Every structure is written in structure tokens, then in C-alpha cells.
Image: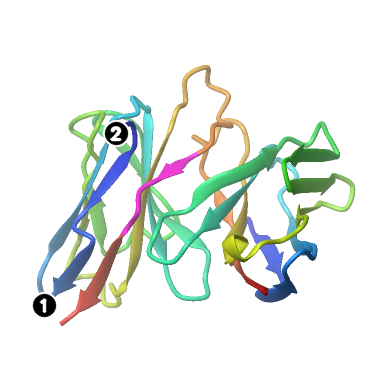
Amino acid sequence: DGGITQSPKYLFRKEGQNVTLSCEQNLNHDAMYWYRQDPGQGLRLIYYSQIVNDFQKGDIAEGYSVSREKKESFPLTVTSAQKNPTAFYLCASSNLRGGTGNQPQHFGDGTRLSIL
Amino acid sequence: QQQVKQSPQSLIVQKGGISIINCAYENTAFDYFPWYQQFPGKGPALLIAIRPDVSEKKEGRFTISFNKSAKQFSLHIMDSQPGDSATYFCAATSTGTASKLTFGTGTRLQVTL
């Protein structure tokens, strides 16, 4: 089955700790994205990547870091600098081939991060 | 800031009724407008999408109406069913932006029996 796999489903972070959220896709999509979802709010873009070894900040990148060493993988690290990390984190991917920029994003089922 | 404003925040509709969710945008460069459906504990799933060269797109019970001059678009769910109870997000993006989506704040739809 083609899709996006996020793990773990639930994650707990202690104060001062960095945690890494996994996102893997087997859709052969060029672009990958990380969003944060808070109750009653829409999805806000944290980081995105159009190609391996390159990524750009989204609207709320502070306190987060990413890497894109493989086309299939786009892990997100929530650092201790992120003071309010409790949220539902969603990873997505899309196909940019043809350069139209108007390709639908496909989402994983998210990781819920909480503070201990 | 590029915004997409969505209303209402929540909606209760009886089974068989029509659910209507509205969105308005500011950035005239937006040229692709998808709607996503999200169930609790799951990621959003693409429901239907429209480009501004058409005023309406229908897929089954779901219809998008688009008004380019007013910079508004809406989702109509005909013959609403309890299984449609979910949160719906409108979104927008423009060509050349790596498909970065700007999302509305979501509408929680409850379809009652």
C-alpha cells in the first residue's frame, strides 16, 4: 500500500529534552511537509522540503529542526527551545513533477506530542 | 499574512440536509483550492478541489462553488449522512510555491439522525 507512515502515534517529552518524529513515504513524492495542529486551529506549516538535502522554514519553524537525507524520509525534531510543543503533528507529501505547484498533499495519521 | 477565513466554526445538520461551509481568501495569487476531511485521530484526507477557471465542481454529494470576484468558495454536502461527521478544512495555494497550503481554521460538522 502506498502512503505516509508517521511514528510513533503518541510521544511524551520531558522538560529540556529533544524528541524526533518520524515520517516515511512510499509515494515517490518530491515534496514533504510538516504541520502542527492545535485544537480549534487550522494546520500551520513548520518546515517543507522540495528535494533531498534541501528544506525551507514555514510559518512557525522556531524550536524545530528537520533533515531530508533520503527522498522517502523527513524527520522532525522538536527541540527544547520549543516552549509549547504539545500538539498534533502531521506530515504530508506531494508530487511536484511538472512544476505546476498545484498538486494535492497526502497526509499521514499524525503524532500526538505531550509534555510530561 | 496570507489568510483563509473559514466559517462556521461548528455546524449541526440533520440527516438528509445540506451542509454548507464557507471560506474567503485575500491572496489573488491563489490558484488551487482543496477541501480536506479529517476524522478524530487521523490525518486530513483530500475530499475535492477546484481551480479558479471554473465556478463549480461536483463529485458525488460534494460540490465546491467558487466566486473569483468575491474571493470566496464554499463546500456543499448534499444529503448529509452521519458518516460525514468530521472536521472540514478549506485550503489554498498558488503555483510556484511548492504546493504550500494555507489552511482555514476548520469546521466541525455533526450530522444528527
Instruction: Pinpoint residue B102: horizontal percent, then vertical percent.
Output: 57, 52
- Per the image, label 2 sits on a secondary structure element best described as strand
Q: Residue at x 21, y 70 (%)?
A: A81
Taking the image as shown, residue B1 lies to the left or right of residue A9, namely right
Q: Quadrant of the C terminus of chain A?
A: bottom left
The residue closer to the viewer here, B26 or B40, is B40
Visible residue check, residue B87: no
Kind of residue at badge 1: Lys
Q: Residue at x 18, y 32 (%)?
A: A69
* Residue count near mark 1 (Cα–Cα under 10 Å), binned few <14, some 14–19, many ≥20: few
Q: Residue at x 37, y 27 (%)?
A: A30
Measure the alpha-carbon separation of dots 1 and 2.
30 Å
* Residue count near mark 2 (Cα–Cα under 10 Å), binned few <14, some 14–19, many ≥20: few
Residue B32 falls inside the magenta stretch: no
Taking the image as shown, residue B9 lies to the left or right of residue B20, namely left
Instruction: Pinpoint residue B10: horizontal percent, then vertical percent.
Output: 65, 76
Residue B107's place in the image compared with B44, above or below, is below
Instruction: Pinpoint residue B63: horizontal percent, then vertical percent.
Output: 77, 46
Instruction: Pinpoint residue B66: horizontal percent, then vertical percent.
Output: 82, 46
Residue A14 is marked as: 1
The residue closer to the viewer here, A55 or B16, is B16
Identify the subunit bearing mark 2: A
- Mark earlier in primary sequence (1, 2): 1
Report the magenta stretch's main SS: loop
Residues shaded magenta: A105-110
| Residue picked out by circle 2 | A54
Q: Quadrant of residue A1?
A: top left
- Per the image, label 1 sits on a secondary structure element best described as loop
Residue B61's place in the image compared with B106, above or below, is above
Identify the subunit bearing mark 1: A
Taking the image as shown, residue B87 lies to the left or right of residue B49, namely left
- Check the image and name the residue furthest to the top: A98
